Image (spheres, rainbow, N blue to C red):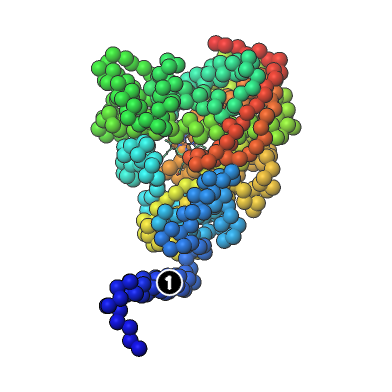
Amino acid sequence: MMVDFLSHPPLLLFHLLSLSLIACVVLWVLKNLTGTWATRVANYPPGSRGIPWIGETLAFVAANNGSKGFYDFVATRHIRYGNCFKTSIHGETHVFVSSIEAAGAILNCDSIDFSKRYIRSIAELLGDHSLLCASHEQHKLIRRRISNLFTVDSMASSINMFDELTIKTLCSWKQKGNVVVFNEALKATFTAICKMVISLEEEDKLEMLRKDVFEARRRIDDSLRKIIASRRKGLERHEDFLQCFLVRDESLHDDPWTDAQILDNILTLIIAGQITTASAIAWMVKYLDENQEVQERLRALHLDLALKLSHFPLGLEALNEMPYACKIVKESLRMATIVSWFPRVALKDCQIGGFQIKKGWIVNVDARSIHYDPTVYDDPIKFNPSRFDEDPKLYSFLAFGTGGRTCLGMNLAKAMMLVFLHRLVITFRWKVTDPDSSLEKWAMFPRLRSGCPIHVTGVGAECKLP
Ligand code: HEM
């Protein structure tokens, strides 16, 4: 018997819905089958595309919410699929690669096959003129302009200034006894970078800026614009980055920067430098607590060095006397891998590590996997600064990236870590009071949720305030 659907609208609707559902399922199965077939034929990287439209976004979000941090999402897939795999997050195809050859190839050919990928929220925070978000040509100009400012002289005065700041910080620890390293280091790195870039010294203004950095771009714009205006009128003059941004850089033959360009790049330097360095310091303190023999060896070396160093505050030449501390800094950066992966967009179809990559895919160089690869680093989970007695293999140490996007603050960050380490070991012994290694949820960089709380006891050397 034929059913007259037209005379039964609910029945018609039911059948139409059922048919659409079946069609969706068939299409999905076909798409996956052809996808798998295409993957085999074209040799795309292995990996799951997850469920239709959503991909593996939910698993990525869950990892961000978990105690092991967002990297856990990558780590589990790295174990499952190997050195190159693909996934789909927020509607985009992401490929993760973790061989040193692929890292070198991708990071050294910025603009030819790959270009830097930035996250929209970062662009909103830093602004379109930021070095991190500018187009390739613009990036080259901005980068040269900023890198010209990291001179030997500016580094030397920044080290002096950071030493004074560190001593002040550590002196305050004497009264407190218990401190959270990340919070203390964040204040110190933020203050140092603000002094270097805009000569901001007043505690209340620094505190206000620090609170606004991630939350109130409008308020930050207002305060920075006031500072820029006062400099343009000649009401103030300082030896800092801002003063250099205000004049034309003769060596580059480019136009003087607008207020917007100056503002976005000042903010970029402040944001790129403070949390990264503060997290690295907190991890280093934790690793040294877990490795007492390394800590004691370092302390012995540095108590001797402190007797020899007649000049105060510490300068560039003093840092050259700290080879073992340098290795501790490197080993801490390897193990912490503050920037876990570096995203790039494929500008055309290409091959990476024998796999086919399609134009538009986001290829992430997985620095953390490289840092923990047992074929690259012997016993990688062991904190062993002496592994850096020899230079690491090319592209195997990626704490600051490599190629045209290498960290501009690399030497400054290493210097701040060294100064902090020197003053810390000659002033205190410490005990981490909360050994929990859980990571902060949704943090931009992997950092300890506890912030690394410690209890300090003096080792006898006196804190000298300038
Ligand atoms: C331990 C601390 C730090 C770590 C681990 C670190 C790591 C990195 C890494 C891995 C990159 C390259 C990302 C990529 O290729 O996609 C980078 C870029 C950058 N870093 Fe750092 N950084 C640190 C401290 C600093 C400091 C102190 C400053 C400045 C005050 C700074 C300024 C920058 C800038 C401006 C860039 C962008 C360079 C460009 O795109 O041309 N960083 N950083």
Estimate how packed mark 1 is, as few (under 14), some (14 to 19) or many (20 or more) residues with alpha carbons within 10 Å.
few
Looking at the image, residue 317 lies above or below residue 271: above
Q: How many numbered discs, if any?
A: 1
* Residue 281, image x, y percentages: 58, 31
Residue 110 x, y percent position in the rendering: 40, 49
Q: Position of residue 370 (x, y in %)?
A: 57, 49
Query: SS of the residue at dot 1?
Result: helix
Q: Is residue 29 visible?
A: yes
Residue pictured at 70% horizontal, 19% vertical: 457
> Percent from the top left, x then y, of residue 439?
57, 40
- Residue at 37%, 44% (x, y): give it: 120
Q: Residue at x 45, y 16 (%)?
A: 203
* Whether residue 309 is visible: no
Q: Is residue 414 left or right of residue 53?
A: right
Q: Amino acid at mark 1?
A: Val
Quarter location, residue 458: top right
Query: Does residue 361 appear to the left or right of 441 in the view shown?
Result: left
Position of residue 206 relative to residue 100, above or below, is above
Q: Quadrant of the N terminus?
A: bottom left
Q: Is residue 4 above or below residue 82?
A: below
- Image quarter (top left, top right, bottom left or bottom right) of the C terminus: top right
Q: Is mark 1 within 8 Å of ligand 1?
A: no
Q: In the rendered image, which quarter is residue 166 located in?
A: top right
Query: Relative to residue 52, is residue 278 depicted above or below?
Result: above
Residue at 44 percent across and 21 percent down: it is 207
365 left or right, relative to 305? left
In the image, 2 versus 434, the foreground residue is: 2
Identify residue for label 1.
Answer: 25
Q: Residue furthest right?
A: 293
